[in-house]
Image: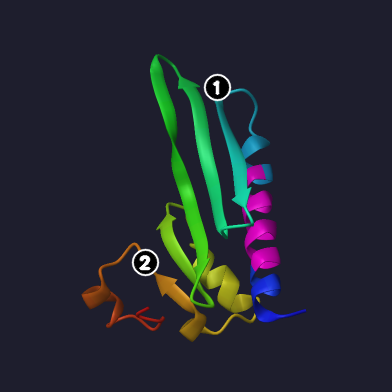
Amino acid sequence: MDKLTRYRELIKRHLLHIAELVNRKPGNGVETACAFDEDRDHYLLLRTGWQDDRRVRGATLYVRLRDNKIWIEEDWTEDGIARALVQEGVPKEDIVLAFYSPETRRHSEYAVA
């Protein structure tokens, strides 16, 4: 299996696992769903629904593959997907924390771009 195929599988498995865990909580009116665009390599974990009289919607996690690296565009999960990917063997040099500015990324242990 080539690197990008492996990355796709890791990302999808992680997002599906989070969605399954979150959706186990009974009927709070908010659903968590995954959206995968494998042709363009965009992977999202979305929340949608109603909580009391307030509309809930948005991306909890948005990851894409770009330039042979994993770009984490948005991550509102408790532990962060970057840590999970590293535990799965993805080198930190292949992970970009894109929700930080390029200047801030220079001070992280992950890739700048």
What amino acid is found at the position of numbered circle 2 in the picture? Ala
Check the image and name the residue furthest to the top.
Answer: 53
N-terminal of the pair, mark 1 or mark 2, is 1
Label 2 element class: loop
**31 to 19, vertically: above or below:** above
**x%, y% of residue 27?**
62, 23
* Disc 1 and disc 2 in contact, CB within 8 angstroms: no
What amino acid is found at the position of numbered circle 1 in the picture? Gly
- Examine the structure image and report whether residue 16 is included in the region drawn in magenta: yes
Mark identifier at residue 29: 1
Q: In which quarter of the image is residue 90?
A: bottom right
Horizontal side, residue 78 vs residue 33: left or right: left
**Residue identified by numbered label 2:** 98
**x%, y% of residue 4?**
64, 74
The quarter of the rendered structure image containing the C terminus is bottom left
What segment is highlighted magenta in the picture? 8-19
* Label 2 Cα crowd, 10 Å radius (few <14 / some 14-19 / many 20+): many
The quarter of the rendered structure image containing the N terminus is bottom right
Check the image and name the residue furthest to the front.
Answer: 39
Horizontal side, residue 109 vs residue 49: left or right: left
Q: What secondary structure characterizes most of the magenta part?
A: helix
Residue at 26% over, 74% down = 102
Residue at 28% over, 82% down = 106
Between disc 1 and disc 2, the foreground one is 2
Label 1 element class: loop
C-alpha distance separating marks 1 and 2: 31 Å
**109 to 61, vertically: above or below:** below
